[in-house]
Image (tube, rainbow, N blue to C red):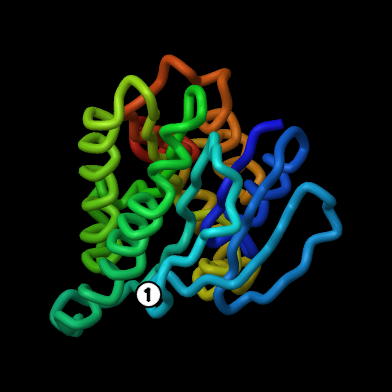
Amino acid sequence: MKNYLVIGGSSGIGKALTEQLAQDGNVHSTYNKNETESSIPTVNYYHLDVIQDEIDLEDLPDEIHGLAYCPGSINLMPFKRIKPAQFAEDFELQVNGAVKVIQKVLPNLKKADNASILFFSTVAVQNGFNFHAQVAASKGAIEGLTRSLAAEFAPKIRVNAIAPSLTDTPLAEKLLSTDEKKEANAQRHPLKTIGNPENIAELGAFLLSDKSKWITGQIIHADGGMSSIKG
């Protein structure tokens, strides 16, 4: 069986991805605030704060076939109200945290055959939206990191990212807290729906699997058509 590591796998897309990967692999999945236990025999949860903690992943198997880095934030506000420290906090969570984890497990990834790394961006990097400067800045760095590492790690390790639109997860609950908000956001998308964690997790599982072994350096938009179709 393949061995997977999901950072931030206790909620939203990370949880759905953990459950998807566990269908045919062993999954080591971390949580920070959302303490959890799994009833799935092939999932092992443990605590990790990528900002505060030393990255201690010594109990991992020698070979890691897939790594997904899922921690994120959605902090929307006018640019004039954002303090430089808030940009730095997002960057620390979403970029530096990923760097620390990858550097720690790179030897495990190199030992595996056709290993894969998966990041998460946002449709807001390629499409300019009001009040998205903070999230788009850090996720823009993730897209650059995706392409750079894909070049550096080829041909042994593939690196891709998914750029979703607004997805119905706990992270987005303030934006989708009523039926009216959900419907208004659905109508902004050509497919007239908002995404759910399973939609993104199925794509993520594909990118971490051997089925995508000729795909690397890609930012794949799973966004209900928002990034490419104009109504």
Q: Height in image: 202 above or below 181?
A: above
Q: Position of residue 90 (x, y in %)?
A: 30, 70
Q: Name the image quarter holding residue 143.
A: top left
The quadrant holding residue 158 is top left
**Other-residue count near label 1 (Cα within 10 Å), few / some / many at <14 / 14–19 / ≥20:** some
**For residue 127, above or below residue 171:** above
Q: Quadrant of the N terminus?
A: top right
Task: Between residue 18 and residue 136, name the one nearer to us.
Answer: 18
Q: Is residue 126 in view from this perspective?
A: no
Question: Which quadrant: the C terminus?
Answer: top left
Q: Can residue 89 be seen in this snapshot?
A: yes
Residue that appears at 47% across and 30% down: 115
Residue 219 in picture, x, y percent from top left: 34, 35
Residue 81 on image: x %, y %: 19, 84
Q: With respect to residue 99, does 34 lie above or below? A: below
* Left or right, 12 with reference to 143: right
Q: Which residue is mark 1?
A: 51
Query: Is residue 41 left or right of 231 when viewed as pictured?
Result: right
Q: Quadrant of residue 101?
A: bottom left
Residue at image coords 21%, 74%: 88
Residue name at image x 49 percent, y 38 percent: 224
45 relative to 177 in the view: left or right:
right
Instruction: Tell me which residue sits at (63%, 47%) in the image.
Output: 17
Identity, as a three-letter code, of the amino acid under mark 1:
Ile
